[in-house]
Amino acid sequence: MGANWTKITVIGKTRDLDEIVAVMSMLDNGLMIEDFSDFSLNGMYGELVDDTILNADKETVKVSLFVPEERSFTEYAEFLSARLPALSIDAKIEIDGVCEDDWAESWKKYYKPVPLGRVTIVPAWEEYEQQGDEVIIRMDPGMAFGTGTHETTRLVIRLMQNLIKGGERVLDVGTGSGILSICASKLGAKWCNAYDIDPTAVRVARENALADGCTNITVGVSDLLRGVDLANGKYDFCVANIVADIIIRMLPDVRKYVKVGSPLILSGIIGERADEVRSAVLSEGFEVEEEITENDWVGMLVRIK
């Protein structure tokens, strides 16, 4: 591939290969898969087979993609670091000689202010002057997904800014960096409860909320909707920027947590899975009120009926 490409490899268990490939295909279809679980000599002379293949761990697979230099490889890496745990996939991510601890520094050169209508996402380390009634969200996402540069995040914010009127209690499922809860808070939400299955994301989201002055955000660990706080009753608003499979799995339980008539914004949906998600939404008796797209991604505004 040469020096102008960065190789990102996910190392996981053979049993999870299909799911790993599905997640990585959201980023690129040109994948290199190393899976020797079914390999046998089949009468071949052993000396003709490379030792690395003969000695390969049959329980482990490696799936790689290659990122061109004009794209932020760290955006790809943070996407994978969020999506794989969301699917309960135990995997390690390696980046072509780049230490994981260096990601947060390496990608800063790609991360600039992102205007999204009334809202602008600004890197925490950049100087930026607010314009008029512009809503500024300062982010340092670290190792959690959600910089505002990815299409799935932008789709949610574009929908959200027209729906938050002030005073809502918001549920954020799969919060990542906390960016959507911070956005809801700054648009006027009264309270935001944010959850993620990844403890690192929970820590980062909590730090980002405090750094941005959002004291009305609480963050906790939760697998889907299990463990969501209902002490103050059902929520007025819900956002879920995860993946199609997880969205479909959570839909049957949404009514327990979100008030009738309330909006539910769904994102993280690759275009080819949109029909599946839409069908699941309709089968639960919900209404798809609006859909917006960016590149191959779809965001849905669903109304709880």
Image (spheres, rainbow, N blue to C red):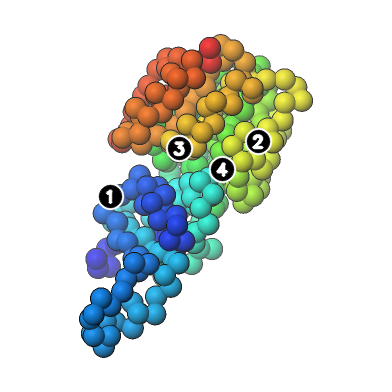
Q: Are marks 3 and 4 in contact (CB under 8 Å)?
A: no
Disc sitting over residue 29 in the figure: 1
Q: CA distance from mark 1 to mark 4?
A: 26 Å
Circle number at residue 245: 3
Depth-wise, is mark 4 or mark 2 nearer the camera? 2
**154 w.r.t. 1: above or below:** above
Residue 268, image x and y in percent? 43, 36
> Which residue is identified by label 4?
177
Which amino acid type is shown beneath numbered disc 3?
Answer: Asp
Residue bearing mark 2 = 226
Comparing labels 3 and 4, the label whose residue is closer to the camera: 3
Residue 222, image quadrant: top right
Q: Residue at x 28, y 85 (%)?
A: 46
Query: Label 1, label 2: how many angstroms apart (C-alpha)?
Result: 33 Å
Disc 1 or disc 2, which is closer to the eye? 2
The quadrant of the rendering that contains the N terminus is: bottom left
- Look at 38% across and 51% down and name the residue there: 18
